[in-house]
Image (cartoon, rainbow, N blue to C red):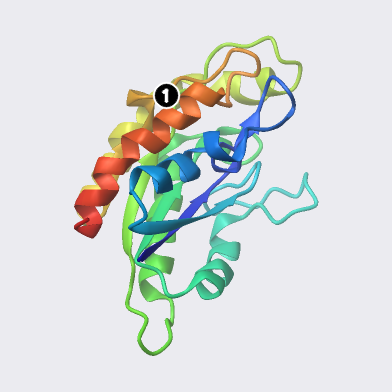
């Protein structure tokens, strides 16, 4: 059985804007992906709300810097056959980075971390799939509106930048914006149907990369 690490933010965690809680386990995209692979792979979900690609965010108690945390998770989940990197939305916050290009450079660094990690004996370097985030949408949310609206146009650039990085680094690629749309409740998170759609959309991409 193959082992996959799903590395992301609140979209991977399964944040539910309507309830302010978490989507049911079976509705979260890593769970849907695992089910779609029919028992041929296990998907370990590592999603943290607010996680960035490589940038510090000291407004939360948890360490949101994806580059700093990733090596620990590569070690704790090893051996791995595939790492899915699904980050970048939080990089658009004006007080963190604010650009899709900056997020793409962050993703590039994460790929370097995965490929240069000192895996133990018998553990090969895992394949990588880069996922481009869904678009943010207009919202009246008191916090997330002003947090993301000033950089809403940047979200349209994710796919182009991420796709280029994936091609240059010979990674798999999936554009989540082709299957999922954020809820206007907060403009960023996905409802149950849309987070399931991400998992369903990734199934053929993962099968192709892993030869399943």
Furthest residue toward right: 61
Q: Where is residue 93 in the image (x, y as percent from the top left)?
A: 61, 33
Left or right, residue 171 beside residue 42: left
Tell me which corner region of the image, top left, top right, bottom left or bottom right, holds residue 112.
bottom left
Q: Which residue is rendered at x = 38% and y = 26% of the image?
A: 177
Q: Is residue 50 above or below residue 15?
A: below
Q: Where is residue 194 in the image (x, y as percent from the top left)?
A: 47, 24
Furthest residue toward front: 39
Q: Which residue is rendered at x = 59% and y = 12% of the image?
A: 184
Left or right, residue 192 beside residue 179: right
What is the secondary structure assignment of the residue under circle 1?
Answer: loop
Q: Quick one: quadrant of the C terminus?
A: bottom left
Tell me which corner region of the image, top left, top right, bottom left or bottom right, holds residue 39.
bottom left
Q: Residues within 10 Å of mark 1 (few under 14, many from 20)?
A: many
Furthest residue toward bottom: 121
Inspect this view and state whether residue 175 appears. Answer: no
Left or right, residue 112 beside residue 92: left
Inspect this view and state whether residue 76 appears. Answer: yes
Q: Position of residue 117 (x, y in %)?
A: 43, 76
Tell me which corner region of the image, top left, top right, bottom left or bottom right, holds residue 142.
top right
Residue in front for this viewpoint, 177 or 122: 122
Q: Which residue is rendered at x = 75% and y = 54% of the image?
A: 62
Q: Quick one: quadrant of the N terminus?
A: bottom left
Disc 1 target residue: 180
Left or right, residue 105 beside residue 166: right
């Amino acid at each position: 059985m193959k082992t996959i690490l799903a590395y992301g933010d609140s979209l991977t965690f399964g944040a539910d804007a309507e309830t302010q809680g978490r989507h049911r386990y079976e509705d979260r995209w890593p769970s849907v992906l695992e089910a779609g692979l029919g028992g041929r792979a296990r998907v370990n979900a590592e999603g943290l709300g607010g996680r960035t690609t490589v940038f510090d965010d000291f407004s939360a108690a948890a360490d949101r810097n994806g580059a700093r945390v990733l090596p620990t998770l590569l070690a704790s989940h090893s051996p791995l056959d595939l790492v899915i990197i699904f980050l970048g939305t939080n990089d658009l916050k004006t007080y963190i980075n604010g650009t899709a290009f900056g997020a793409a450079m962050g993703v590039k660094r994460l790929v370097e971390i995965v490929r240069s990690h000192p895996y133990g004996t018998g553990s090969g370097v895992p394949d990588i799939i880069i996922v481009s985030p869904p678009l943010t949408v207009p919202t009246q949310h008191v916090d997330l509106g002003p947090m993301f609206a000033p950089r809403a146009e940047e979200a349209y650039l994710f796919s182009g930048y991420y796709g280029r990085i994936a091609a240059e680094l010979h990674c798999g690629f999936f554009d989540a914006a082709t299957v999922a749309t954020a809820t206007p409740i907060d403009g960023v998170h996905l409802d149950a149907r849309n987070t399931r759609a991400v998992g369903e959309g990734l199934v053929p991409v993962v099968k192709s990369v892993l030869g399943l």
